[in-house]
Image (cartoon, rainbow, N blue to C red):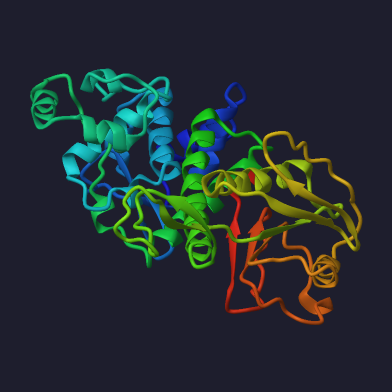
Amino acid sequence: MTDITLDKALLNLISDPYDKDNCFYGHILAQCIINIDNKFDGIAGVGYWNDNFHLVVNPNRIEIFTLNEQKAILVHEAMHILFNHVQRKKNKAHFAWNLATDAAINQFIPNLPKGCIYPETLGYERGKYAEYYYEASSSSNQNRVQACEHFKTLDSHKLWQSSESENDEEMQKKVSTVIKQACEKSIGHLPFPAKKALELLEEKSKTHWQRELKKIMSNSIKYYEPSHKKVNRRFPNRLDLPGKKSVYMPALVCVIDVSGSMSNQEIASGLIEIEKICRITRHKFIAIQVDTMVHDISKIEFKEHQFVRKGSGGTDLYPALEYIKEHNLRHDILVFITDGGFSFGSWKEMPKAPMFFLITDKKMIDLPTKKSRQIKLVSGL
Ligand SMILES: [Zn+2]
């Protein structure tokens, strides 16, 4: 069942000839399961259950607004999805999180009805995430807003409490699929808030892979450095003599897929990731460029190194592993930057070292060994 008012507002959003942003948000909502409910306690609301986002609208309450206001309300709902506010709620207090999330998104939405919450309403500057407004808003601040007669709850966030997914990652995955789809449908257009939302999703996946890699790195102690914080084992009473501090220095070899399907931007986003880790662990790594043959071997020190791409043919990563074996290159960890468009068919033997696949495309791969991991880099969008 649908409703004429909602249909009109939604269609108007998707086919808005003057506003590409609206078109994008319309395509976000078009991927929701839409429920029209006359008894719904609010104008509109979103929630997540049965692996889908749901949009609930009360037609009696939304029809009193102008068409532009109705569109703004729908954009507001789309932004709650975009910024994953349902999942980010966690154990936060309901009312404070309501205010914080509305303040975070309303600053980007023109034509909202009067009396909505903005960062200024809470006494804070624009341009911050919901968690910032949540932490910053004191209870006295909340009481002031609640007591203010101009304040209106625009939509209902009640469905967030009954929302459920198997785990956080699942809902995050759904959000990035929804964003990608909307971006494709609106011919590659990505509004500014959507870029911010993507950054946020990306940050999460990055910390995830950085944590995993650091865990492996800390298991491989390689050499010792003098340190006055440690006792000298040979002369324990001589406090003036330094002891030995172990320093973690695993050898990292990075295999870069430079086949034709990999864009320079994809390669760059992978290298940026590795650079971050290497800055923390203070070490250099060997980069091997390969398409169907090895093109370039270089030791990367980020200070001066300019990455120069060498190949762009078909895809077979195994020659890089053969090269490592032939030249006896020390490798505690192998990191691959690839779009996943290769096969393990040609791999005559599997490396014993842990392998990290940084996947730049949507394809995920079947991992070949127990010690391997794959992480999707969202920035390919
Ligand atoms: Zn809201």
Give coordinates of residue 132: x percent, y percent: 30, 33
Q: Which quarter of the figure is the C terminus placed in?
A: top right
**Residue 32 visible in the picture:** no
Residue at 61% of width from left, 51% of height from top? Answer: 377
Front-most of residues 63 and 352: 352
Instruction: Name above or below for residue 361 compared with residue 352.
Output: above
Q: Which quarter of the figure is the N terminus placed in?
A: bottom left
Front-most of residues 257 and 340: 257
Residue at 63% of width from left, 67% of height from top? Answer: 332
Q: How many marks?
A: 0
Instruction: Name above or below for residue 145 compared with residue 353.
Output: above
**Residue 86 visible in the picture:** yes
Front-most of residues 91 and 47: 91
Give coordinates of residue 24: x percent, y percent: 56, 36
Give coordinates of residue 244: x percent, y percent: 44, 57
Q: Which quarter is ligand 1 in?
A: top left
Give coordinates of residue 315: x percent, y percent: 85, 62
Q: Is residue 346 left or right of residue 145?
A: right
Instruction: Name above or below for residue 17 compared with residue 207.
Output: above
Front-most of residues 65 and 364: 364
Q: Is residue 312 left or right of residue 377?
A: right
Q: Is residue 310 left or right of residue 105?
A: right
